[in-house]
Image (cartoon, helix red, strand yellow):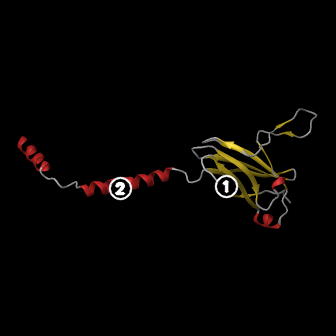
């Protein structure tokens, strides 16, 4: 019984040539390219995401609640926000934690978000974006426009990058 095992082991030892140099190099190249592809599958191509959480109409203003989420290993500066076909000066951006002021005082106490605004790696920012009712016929026909964000990656030189997302707006009920 031992002889069979020894004979088999002996045959394997003498059967050189199965793994030639070119086979090893080819296998290494295959592993390298497959590993590179796997890495790209798990690495997000987008560095900044915009999630639309809410759209409403309140007191003659469109209000959009949005979340800006970083998927980048380094910090990101949000440089500016605007809606296509609207006046950027009309937009107000504030944190959604608005609290009513004490009795007898008018208005809301809102913490305004100023730009540029730093997002740390893996961080997110929830904001309310308010602007006066839009009357542009193209926006009304399409029931919305695009929310545009210019941002800069701390590890990239040059001009800011831009990301946009179609955004449905709400109007007062007729």
| Residue appearing at x 63%, y 43% in the figure | 75
- Considering the image in quadrants, where does the N terminus appear? top left
Percent x, y of residue 166: 70, 59
Percent x, y of residue 13: 13, 48
| Residue appearing at x 18%, y 55% in the figure | 17
Residue linked to disc 2 = 29
Answer yes or no: is residue 1 visible: no
Tell which of 53 and 119 is nearer to you.
119
Q: Is residue 8 left or right of residue 65?
A: left
Answer yes or no: is residue 169 visible: yes
* Disc 1 secondary structure class: loop
Q: Is residue 24 left or right of residue 81?
A: left
Q: Is residue 72 left or right of residue 101?
A: left
| Mark 2 vs mark 1, CA separation in Å | 37 Å
| Residue appearing at x 77%, y 39% in the figure | 97
Q: Is residue 95 left or right of residue 120?
A: right
Residue linked to disc 1 = 159
Please rate how many residues cluster around mark 2, counting C-alpha atoms within 10 Å: few if below 14, some from 14 to 19, many from 20. few
Query: Farthest front residue?
Result: 157
Percent x, y of residue 163: 66, 56
């Amino acid at each position: 019984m031992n002889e069979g095992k020894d004979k088999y082991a002996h045959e394997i030892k003498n059967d050189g040539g199965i793994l030639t140099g070119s086979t090893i190099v080819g296998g290494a190249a295959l592993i390298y390219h497959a590993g590179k592809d796997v890495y790209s599958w798990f690495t997000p191509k987008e560095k900044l995401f915009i999630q639309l959480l809410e759209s409403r109409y309140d007191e003659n203003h469109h209000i959009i609640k949005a979340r800006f989420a970083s998927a980048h290993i380094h910090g990101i500066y949000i440089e500016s926000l605007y809606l296509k076909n609207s006046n950027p000066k009309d937009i107000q951006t504030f944190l959604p934690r608005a609290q009513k002021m004490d009795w007898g005082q008018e208005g809301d106490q809102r913490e305004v978000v100023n730009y540029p605004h730093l997002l740390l790696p893996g961080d997110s920012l929830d904001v309310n974006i308010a602007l006066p009712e839009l009357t542009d016929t193209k926006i009304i026909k399409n029931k919305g426009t695009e929310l545009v964000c210019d941002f800069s990656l701390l590890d990239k030189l040059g001009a800011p990058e831009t990301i946009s997302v179609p955004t449905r707006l709400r109007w007062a009920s007729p």
